[in-house]
Amino acid sequence: MVDVVVRFNSKKIIADVKNVVDSEKKSVVDDVFQTVKRRSPVQTGKFRRSWSKSVSSNRITIKNPQPYGGDLEKGKSPQAPMGVVRPSINEVIKRQQNRRKIK
């Protein structure tokens, strides 16, 4: 007779999973941030330069304080007729889905 004992270090497994999730979260947020900046219409460049990202314990915020940002999101720029944020998020989602298909 052969006995096999398998022991799991659940604290380490949980920590490893958390690290993977945190890394993926950072990657997606960085991708959204870069995509939003790239897709931002440019007249003077002020809107594109005004994007910022802030991180707190459980929230990541990407924002642009320019007062005309709302108009740009409504498609009032020929450079971004569909807005900036929603198309950027959709682009990142597609990129992430394709990345997962490849693995």
Image (cartoon, grey):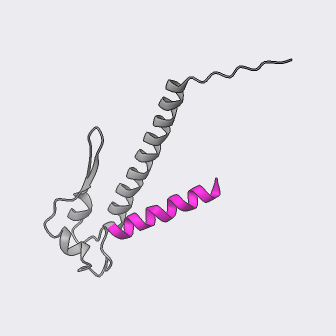
Residue 89's x, y, as percent? 39, 64
Classify the position of the N terminus by image quarter: top right
Q: Is residue 76 above or below residue 10?
A: below
Q: Is residue 87 magenta?
A: yes
Q: Residue 66 or 14: which is nearer the viewer?
A: 14
Q: Is residue 51 magenta?
A: no
Residue name at image x 38 percent, y 66 percent: 88
Residue 35's x, y, as percent? 38, 61
The answer to which quarter of the image holds residue 76 is bottom left
Residue 97's x, y, as percent? 54, 61
Q: Residue 90 or 2: which is nearer the viewer?
A: 2
6 on left or right of 75: right
56 on left or right of 66: right
Q: Residue 66 or 82: which is nearer the viewer?
A: 82
Residue name at image x 25 percent, y 79 percent: 77
Residue name at image x 47 percent, y 35 percent: 19
The answer to which quarter of the image holds residue 73 is bottom left
Magenta part of the protein: which range?
Answer: 86-103
Q: Is residue 5 above or below residue 40?
A: above
- Helix, strand or loop: magenta stretch: helix
Residue name at image x 56 percent, y 23 percent: 9
Q: Is residue 75 above or below residue 38?
A: below
Q: Is residue 21 above or below residue 37?
A: above
